[in-house]
Image (tube, grey):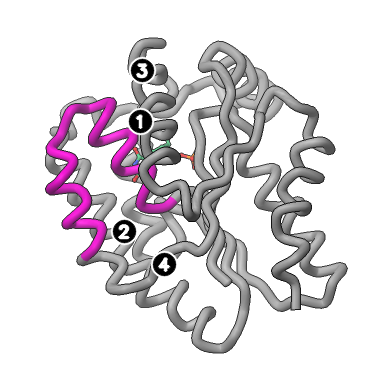
Amino acid sequence: MFITFEGIEGCGKTTQTKRLGKRLQDQGIRHLITREPGGSVIGASIRQILLDSRNIDLVPLAELFLYAADRAQHIDETIRPALDQGDWVICDRFIDATVAYQGTARRQDIAFIKLLNKKAINGILPEITFLCDCPVETGLARAMKRNKELAQEDQDRFEQEALDFHRKVRQGYLDLAKEYSNRFVIIDATLTENEMEQEIFKTLEPLLP
Ligand code: TMP
């Protein structure tokens, strides 16, 4: 079973990824929690380049190729081996993030992005994608609070983007949820963490072995 989590900054998806991992552990289900960018050894270096706030000169096409490179490596090194041995894989961001961020928000060619995604994933598609959806103001306020708690002075390259950019990302995700309604499940990310966890688990319960 391959499950992905998506959403704007501060939507709570990383917390839900971990909570789901705990639930699966309680059920005795072997699983792997991973993320993009940075879910492989080489991907960790790519993640540093992508999120470094000093890299203001990174051009949109180079950014897109770095996400695709990270994904190709991630699939081969991490995701496919785990799925092959029957483990569940839970991934914090995947192909849809590239369509929403680099496509809808950065206005790069979405058809080209989908083609790149197709090449990178080499036949491995998530069965369920949870879109944790909330207004951008709610998400960004949470992301800033988290940075403060982690004593992180700096915002990353994406958190620094204007409100309008994040609104486009959100819209991009909502459009994808409509287009791929067979695998998308929208979770109301204005709910509490406990409520979100329950909603997510309710969807997955019938699929447990
Ligand atoms: P996160 O670990 O906080 O989700 O940070 C990853 C950042 O990378 C986030 O701002 C979204 C961005 N991103 C893209 O722009 N495109 C992608 O394809 C992926 C996977 C992430």
Query: Residue 209 versus residue 108: which sits nearer the camera?
Result: 209
Q: Residue at x 22, y 51 (%)?
A: 114
Q: Which residue is mark 2?
A: 70
Q: Secondary structure at mark 3?
A: loop
Question: Which one is earlier in the sequence, the residue at label 3 or at label 2?
Answer: 2
Q: Nearer the viewer, mark 4 or mark 1?
A: 1
Q: Nearer the viewer, mark 4 or mark 2?
A: 2
Classify residue 105 as left or right of residue 183: left
Q: Secondary structure at mark 4?
A: helix
Q: Nearer the viewer, mark 4 or mark 3?
A: 3
Residue 71 placement (x, y as % from top left): 33, 60
Question: Which one is earlier in the sequence, the residue at label 4 or at label 1?
Answer: 4
Vertical comparison of 202 with 52: above or below = below
Vertical comparison of 185 with 120: above or below = above
Q: Residue at x 79, y 29 (%)?
A: 192
Q: Secondary structure at mark 2?
A: helix
Q: Which residue is mark 3?
A: 161
Specify the quarter for ligand 1: top left
